[in-house]
Image (cartoon, rainbow, N blue to C red):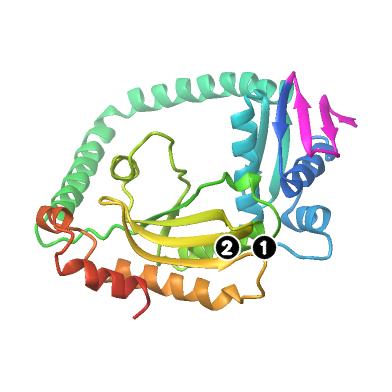
């Protein structure tokens, strides 16, 4: 099936674009198909929910995450010229090649024209702009002094959700559990209790090294494992600068275990750790695994 130069294979949920094969999970495949069928028009969140999830309604945050997963799959496939664009307050649309280039080329003269008039305005009102500029510098200086004040306490609330399998490759119960957990993290971010950043574990990079690069306070690690022909999800809370596991829980995917209480407890553990202001570890604490800080942090992580 071909739609706007995209070839959709419904048997293996793959899409071919300009010779690049994009391998997708069923949800991402349906999402890309819905966007392609709209022929460049904006699809609202409600329309996407109905077309992709059917009778099961999906929240705006769930759709946002699924769009992120789809974008990652497109990028990793090497397919250039295919963009899922978010339109604030309206929804999402798919931009294919020429449409993207056309928008870029037509926007340049407008930018140049705007810059020309801006330059004339600045030149015309130099006498006024000088005191305004000095006032602006004074304001910046005030906030710089405030930020660097020794009494100011910086609280790092940056959380990363890592997986041992790429999110767009998850299926079945594992995908449902991952989506549920991701939704809870996003909802907690809306309450300004955490700052969930889009970060994936980089192969060959030590956890403390990547933690410094991403300025992470905590890592929520979602692992899908197989043992004795059974499949499990292992959910952990990790202190990233020492790669210390503060909490780890395992759930068998085939069981009827209610994961809601576990996810709620994990969320409580994360928020308690962040609000404790104890994650800014000293050199001695990081280098001494027997330091008393570790039992304290593990108790918080386990919602005690």
Residue drawn 60% across the image and 24% down it: 107
Q: Quadrant of the C terminus?
A: bottom left
Q: Could you say where residue 230 lies in the image, as x and y percent from the top left?
A: 63, 60
Kindly tell me whether residue 64 is visible in this rendering: yes
Q: Quadrant of the N terminus?
A: top right
- Residue in the foreground of this view, choosing between 215 and 290: 290
The x and y percentages for residue 184 are 54, 66
Q: Residue 172, how many percent across, how many down?
A: 71, 57
Q: Which residues are magenta?
A: 1-19
Is residue 198 rendered magenta in the image? no
Determine the secondary structure under disc 2.
Answer: helix
Residue assigned mark 2: 183
Q: Is residue 189 above or below residue 17?
A: below
Label 2–label 1 contact, CB within 8 A: yes
Q: Residues within 10 Å of mark 2 (few under 14, many from 20)?
A: some
- Residue assigned mark 1: 59
Residue at the farthest front position: 228
At a point 57% along the width and 23% down the height, the residue shown is 110
Q: Is residue 150 left or right of residue 235?
A: left
Vertical position of residue 15 compared to residue 257: above or below = above
Which residue is located at x 13 percent, y 56 percent?
282
């Amino acid at each position: 099936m071909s739609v706007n130069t995209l070839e959709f294979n419904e048997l293996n949920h793959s899409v071919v674009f300009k010779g690049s094969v994009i391998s997708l999970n069923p949800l991402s495949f349906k999402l890309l198909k819905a966007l392609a069928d709209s022929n460049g028009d904006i699809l609202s969140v409600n329309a996407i929910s109905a077309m992709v999830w059917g009778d099961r309604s999906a929240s705006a945050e769930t759709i946002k995450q699924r769009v992120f997963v789809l974008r990652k799959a497109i990028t990793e496939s090497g397919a250039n010229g295919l963009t899922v664009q978010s339109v604030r307050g309206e929804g999402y649309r798919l931009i294919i090649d020429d449409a993207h280039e056309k928008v870029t080329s037509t926007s340049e003269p407008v930018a140049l024209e705007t810059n020309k008039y801006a330059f004339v305005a600045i030149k015309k009102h130099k006498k006024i702009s000088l005191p305004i500029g000095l006032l602006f510098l004074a304001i910046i200086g005030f906030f710089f002094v405030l930020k660097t004040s020794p009494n100011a306490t910086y609280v790092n609330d940056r959380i990363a959700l890592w997986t041992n399998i790429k999110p767009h490759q998850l299926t079945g119960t594992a995908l449902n559990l991952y989506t549920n957990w991701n939704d809870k993290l996003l909802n907690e971010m809306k309450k300004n209790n955490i700052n969930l950043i889009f970060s994936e574990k980089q192969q060959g990079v030590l956890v403390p090294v990547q933690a410094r690069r991403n300025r992470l306070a905590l890592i929520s690690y979602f692992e899908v494992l197989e043992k004795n022909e059974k499949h499990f999800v292992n959910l952990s809370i990790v202190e990233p600068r020492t790669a210390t596991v503060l909490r780890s829980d395992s759930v068998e995917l085939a069981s009827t275990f209610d994961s809601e209480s576990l996810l709620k407890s994990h969320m409580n553990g994360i928020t308690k750790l962040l609000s404790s202001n104890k994650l800014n570890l000293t050199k001695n604490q990081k280098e001494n695994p027997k330091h008393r800080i570790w039992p304290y942090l593990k108790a918080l992580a386990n919602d005690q």
